[in-house]
Amino acid sequence: MIGDSTMTEYDQSRKPQAGWGEQVPMFVSDKATVRNWARGGRSSRSFYYEDGLWNLVKETIKTGDYLIIQFGHNDQKLGDAYEEFGTYAYCSDGTSNGEDCLDTEHSYYQFLKKYVKEARDLGAVPILMTPIVRKYFSGASIRNSGLHDLESVNTGELFARGNYPAAMKEVAVLLDVPMVDLTAQTKAIVEKYGDQAATESLYISADSTHPQVLFATLIAKAAMKSLQQQEVLTDYIIEATSFISSPETLQWNDRYVGVANVKTLTLSAFDLSPNTGNLVATAPDGFLLSNAPDSTNWTTILTVPYENGAFTEKMYVQFTPYSEKSFNDSISFFAGGIDLGAVNVSGNGVAVGNGLPAYSRWFTEGGALAALTDGPITAQDANVVNLDTGSVKTFAVNEQDTGVARFRVYGPDLVSKNDDKYLEFAVTAATQTFS
């Protein structure tokens, strides 16, 4: 699989963000191996030329392999990024004639042809998939720009970029390539949810482009089902469980007796019946549940409502060992009386004084000042003194979007010490009598 950040894989620290490519193995039997080469920020042009991407992919392709190709989001980049990433759907001369385009270096149509032909030369079967929609609503519908049909002329350019999915469809017809219209299929999914519910359940909070786990799963399911309907990969595509937990288990290892610690589960489900209902989670001995990490109402049974036959929710699990022993059991999940599955939870209670580390963290959610502690300590919220608070900036760290809090000083204070401008962090250790 080759593509961009909507397809790529994300580590657990980035959940609930997920690329749909990382959910594909759910729908593929163990007779096949899925290799996800997608990388964030890449376009059909940049992926083709960047060292360690397309050329390396080609080295791994064997006769009989299938290659899923999906680009489009980053092909629309502007300004200084255009030369490296940008393409027009067909041609930079403003025409809808990709075949006769002279500027092949900035033609989405032409790059798709290159991938298809080079994959076939290596004995692979190429598959084209149009880009997933951006959550750009106009009323109850996704507007054309969200469908990657760019009708307006960008500042500094002479022509509109054009319709990227349409260009891909023409390549598919011309070269007789299997194609899945994920633009149309994700349009139907997102419009079914509506703007507010899609914001809450389908896309990450930072933007209108990147999927959460549930949406990534629904996209992967739609993609594999469409291939099955076209009698492509039919020997490998399977039905999948409707319940997903990320991570699949929670482990606390050694914890001081009486000192609570909280971990997070991201839960997703689809194809639930009834279409509207409740998820019921039940925690074992030593563990409690809540829908907020700083809750004052922890419980052994937590009920979470859902709609549209699907949900993505964060659930917080608190482990408080009450004696020096091992705890190893599972949280169970039911919906509509149906057993969805379980998540194993484990940890050990040890006496205070056994040398376990304690720490505090700040800015765990962008600009949030609240302290999160672990161990027999207390911590104050971060104190911002005489600094201008900037907006949280999203940077790509290890190819993953990361929110970074920013505080600014101006003028001479920028380069000189000033005792009146600072960030303050304070931690206090608990008192304890040892015998």
Image (cartoon, rainbow, N blue to C red):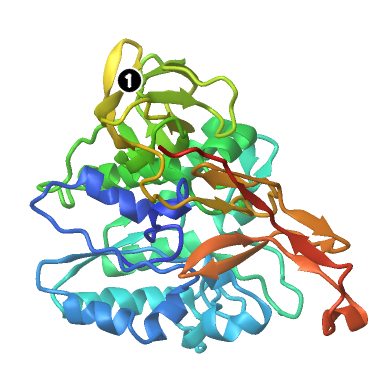
Question: Residue at the spot x=46%, y=16% of the render?
Answer: 303
Q: How many numbered discs sit on the rendered protein?
A: 1
- Three-letter code for the amino acid on which mark 1 is drawn: Asp
Determine the residue located farthest toward the front in the rendered image. 435
Residue 172 in the image, given as x and y percentages of width and height: 33, 64
Question: Residue at the spot x=27%, y=27% of the render?
Answer: 330
Viewer-side residue, 153 vs 43: 43
**Is 432 positioned to the left or the right of 334 in the image?**
right
**Is 100 positioned to the left or the right of 329 in the image?**
right
Which quadrant would residue 268 be assigned to in this image?
A: top left
Residue 259 in the image, given as x and y percentages of width and height: 46, 34
Residue that badge 1 annotates: 285
In the rendered image, the vertical position of residue 327 relative to residue 410, given as above or below: above
In the rendered image, the vertical position of residue 113 relative to residue 188, given as above or below: below
Determine the residue located farthest toward the right in the rendered image. 411
In the rendered image, the vertical position of residue 430 relative to residue 94, given as above or below: above
Viewer-side residue, 432 vs 240: 432
In the rendered image, the quadrant that contains the N terminus is: bottom left
For the question of whether residue 194 can be seen, the reply is yes
SS class, disc 1: loop
In the rendered image, the quadrant that contains the C terminus is: top left
In the rendered image, the vertical position of residue 360 relative to residue 120, given as above or below: above
Category of crowding for the residue at label 1, using alpha-carbon neighbours closer than 10 angstroms: few (below 14), some (14–19), many (at least 20): some
For the question of whether residue 180 can be seen, the reply is no
Residue 82 in the image, given as x and y percentages of width and height: 60, 81
**Is 360 positioned to the left or the right of 154 in the image?**
left
Viewer-side residue, 183 vs 200: 200
Question: Residue at the spot x=52%, y=42% of the render?
Answer: 376
Question: Residue at the spot x=40%, y=44% of the render?
Answer: 353
